[in-house]
Image (cartoon, helix red, strand yellow):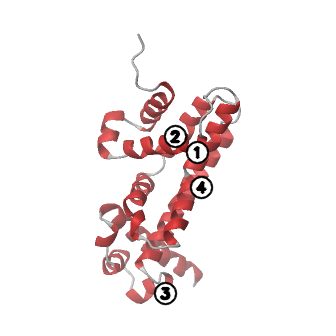
Amino acid sequence: MQDRSVATINNILDAARGLFIEKQYADVSLREITEIAGVTKGALYHHFATKEELYLELIYHCLAEVKESARASQEKSQGESCRNRLYLSLASFLNLPPDTLAIMRSIRRNINIFAEPARTNLVRAYQAALPEQIESLLIDGMANGEIIPVDARLLSWQHVAVVEVSLHEYGRQQLGGPEQMADSIVSLFFNGIQAVK
C-alpha cells in the first residue's frame, strides 16, 4: 500500500513539474495534473489539499536538491581558492537536471502569488539553498584576502542575480554549456567588465 501511495505522489509531482515549467502558475489546473498523472481528483486531494500545496512541495523538493548540490560542492572544494570554489559550486548547480533549473527559474516568476506565511517560508528556503551557500564561500574568500571586504550577503545576491539572468534561453545560447557558463559568470564576477589595457 505504501509503495502505491509513493508512486501516486511521484506521478502527481512529475505531472505538475512539467506543467509548472511549461505554464504560469495561474494557468495550471488541477484537472490537467490529474489527467497527465493518470490519477483521480480524489487521489490528488488525498495527498495535496490545494494547488499551492502541490506547487510548494515541488519547489521545496527542488530547493533541497540545490542545497545538497551546493553543500557537496563546498565540501569537496575545501582548501581551494575562493574563485575556484565559486566556479565548482556554480558548475555543479548548472549541471543539475534541466527540470530542476526550470523550476528554479519559476520561483522568482511566481513568488508574489503566495500569501504569508507561505511567501516568507519560500523566500527563506530559497535563501538557504542558494545565496547563503554563496555567502559562506565569499566570507571565506574575504578572510583569505582573495576578495575585498564588502557586505557578503549583498554580494551573494548580486552573484545569484547574474546566474538567474544567465539561465534564460538567451543566456544559455550566448554562454554555452554549464562549465562555459560557470567560467564566464565567475570571470565576470571576479574581473568585472573593464577592458584591461
Could you tell me how far apart the alpha carbons at marks 4 and 3 are, in whole angstroms?
Answer: 30 Å
Q: Position of residue 140 (x, y in %)?
A: 68, 36
Q: Secondary structure at mark 2?
A: helix
Could you tell me how far apart the alpha carbons at marks 2 and 1 are, in whole angstroms?
Answer: 17 Å
Specify the quadrant of the image occupied by residue 78.
Answer: top right
- Identify the residue shown where x is 48% and y is 42%: 158
Q: Position of residue 126 (x, y in %)?
A: 53, 57
Q: Secondary structure at mark 1?
A: helix
Between label 4 and label 3, give the one nearer the viewer.
Answer: 4
Between label 3 and label 1, give the one nearer the viewer.
Answer: 1
Q: Secondary structure at mark 4?
A: helix
Checking the image for residue 46, the label placed there is 3
- Identify the residue shown where x is 54% and y is 34%: 87
Q: Quadrant of the C terminus?
A: top left
Q: Secondary structure at mark 3?
A: helix
Spot the residue most to the bottom: 42
- Decide which of 177, 55 is in the foreground and name it: 55
Q: Position of residue 23 (x, y in %)?
A: 30, 64
Could you tell me how far apart the alpha carbons at marks 2 and 3 are, in whole angstroms?
Answer: 38 Å
Question: What amino acid does circle 4 point to?
Answer: Ala
Checking the image for residue 153, the label placed there is 1
Task: Please report whichever mark, 2 or 3, sits nearer to the chain's N-terminal start.
Answer: 3
- Decide which of 39, 41 is in the foreground and name it: 41
Between label 2 and label 1, give the one nearer the viewer.
Answer: 1
Residue at the spot of label 2: 90
- Decide which of 118, 71 is in the foreground and name it: 118
Could you tell me how far apart the alpha carbons at marks 1 and 4 are, in whole angstroms?
Answer: 12 Å
Question: What amino acid does circle 3 point to?
Answer: His
- Identify the residue shown where x is 36% and y is 35%: 176
Residue at the spot of label 4: 128
Task: Please report whichever mark, 4 or 2, sits nearer to the chain's N-terminal start.
Answer: 2
